[in-house]
Image (cartoon, rainbow, N blue to C red):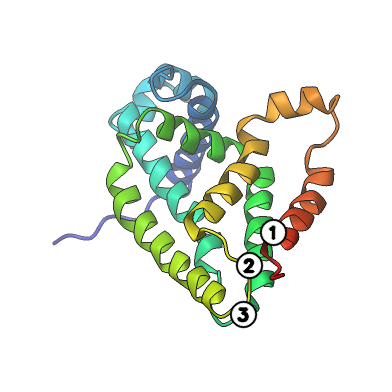
């Protein structure tokens, strides 16, 4: 089987420009509201030039989501069953909050896909994400059984962490309006730390 030829520097630059532009367009307009013309314009390329790299809007979107999901799961992968349970969970929720601060476009892209029923990533959600969450929920259950953290439902604990942290990216405009333009992340980390320490510390 012939090997794929390495991309030239210009090809790598153009592909990166397409992916960055697509992230802007998809996160702002969703999959259905976005067009190849919009992405090409944002990337500073002609439509035929863009189609040299990706045959369709669907191909660009799928490539973005594949990269995103791997990045999105990294913080949960690092949850260490051998570490201090409370500190591991607090560190996890802080990593998720930092991701919302650093990758707001990616968070909105993922949220838009889920709101549409996850037609392009449902198989990955059912396999990669589900198996990882099941694995870490079992770790949390073990900590609960050992009396190391308070009794909570492990899946709903993770759901709460996702929703609380990703809210700052997905509802950025609303949050900033309510806070009169203040940086919403300034007080978020301290609040989240206090909330989960109180919730998870055994009584």
Q: What residue does disc 1 label? A: 199
The tag on residue 53 is none
Task: Answer with mark 1 or mark 3, whichever residue precedes in sequence.
Answer: 3
Which residue shows up at 44% across the image and 50% down it? 69
Q: Nearer the viewer, mark 1 or mark 3?
A: 1
Q: Nearer the viewer, residue 73 or 151?
A: 151
Q: Does 151 sit left or right of 182 as displayed?
A: left
Mark 2: few, some, or many residues within 10 Å (few <14, many ≥20)?
Answer: some
Mark 1: few, some, or many residues within 10 Å (few <14, many ≥20)?
Answer: some
Mark 3: few, some, or many residues within 10 Å (few <14, many ≥20)?
Answer: few
Asked whether the viewer can see residue 80, the reply is no
Q: Is residue 3 above or below residue 118?
A: below
Measured as percent of width and height from the top left, residue 110 is found at 47, 38
Measured as percent of width and height from the top left, residue 96 is found at 62, 53
Measured as percent of width and height from the top left, residue 116 is found at 38, 27
Q: Is residue 200 above or below residue 14?
A: below
Q: Nearer the viewer, mark 2 or mark 3?
A: 2
SS class of the residue under badge 3?
A: loop
SS class of the residue under badge 1?
A: helix
Which residue shows up at 55% across the image and 69% down it? 78
State the CA–CA distance, disc 2 to disc 3: 16 Å
Q: Is residue 116 above or below residue 75?
A: above
Q: Nearer the viewer, residue 48 or 61?
A: 61
Q: What residue does disc 2 label? A: 150
Q: Quadrant of residue 31?
A: top left
Asked whether the viewer can see residue 60, the reply is yes
Q: Nearer the viewer, residue 149 or 34?
A: 149
Task: Answer with mark 2 or mark 3, whichever residue precedes in sequence.
Answer: 3
Q: What residue does disc 3 label? A: 83
Q: Is residue 2 above or below residue 169?
A: below
Measured as percent of width and height from the top left, residue 44 is found at 52, 25
């Amino acid at each position: 089987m012939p090997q794929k030829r390495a991309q030239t520097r210009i090809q790598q630059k153009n592909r990166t420009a397409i992916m960055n532009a697509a992230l802007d367009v998809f996160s702002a307009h969703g999959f259905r509201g976005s067009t190849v013309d919009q992405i090409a314009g944002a990337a500073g390329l002609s439509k035929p030039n863009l189609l040299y790299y990706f045959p369709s809007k669907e191909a660009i979107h799928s490539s973005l989501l594949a990269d995103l999901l791997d990045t999105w799961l990294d913080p949960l992968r690092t949850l260490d069953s051998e570490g201090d349970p409370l500190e591991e969970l607090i560190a996890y929720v802080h990593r998720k909050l930092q991701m919302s601060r650093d990758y707001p476009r990616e968070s909105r892209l993922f949220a838009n896909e889920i709101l549409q029923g996850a037609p392009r990533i449902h198989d990955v959600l059912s396999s990669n994400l589900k198996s990882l969450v099941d694995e870490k929920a079992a770790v949390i259950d073990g900590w609960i059984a050992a009396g190391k953290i308070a009794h909570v439902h492990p899946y709903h604990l993770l759901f709460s962490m996702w929703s609380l942290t990703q809210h700052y990216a997905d509802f950025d405009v609303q949050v900033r309006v309510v806070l009169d333009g203040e940086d919403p992340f300034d007080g978020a980390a301290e609040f989240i730390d206090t909330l989960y320490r109180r919730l998870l510390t055994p009584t």
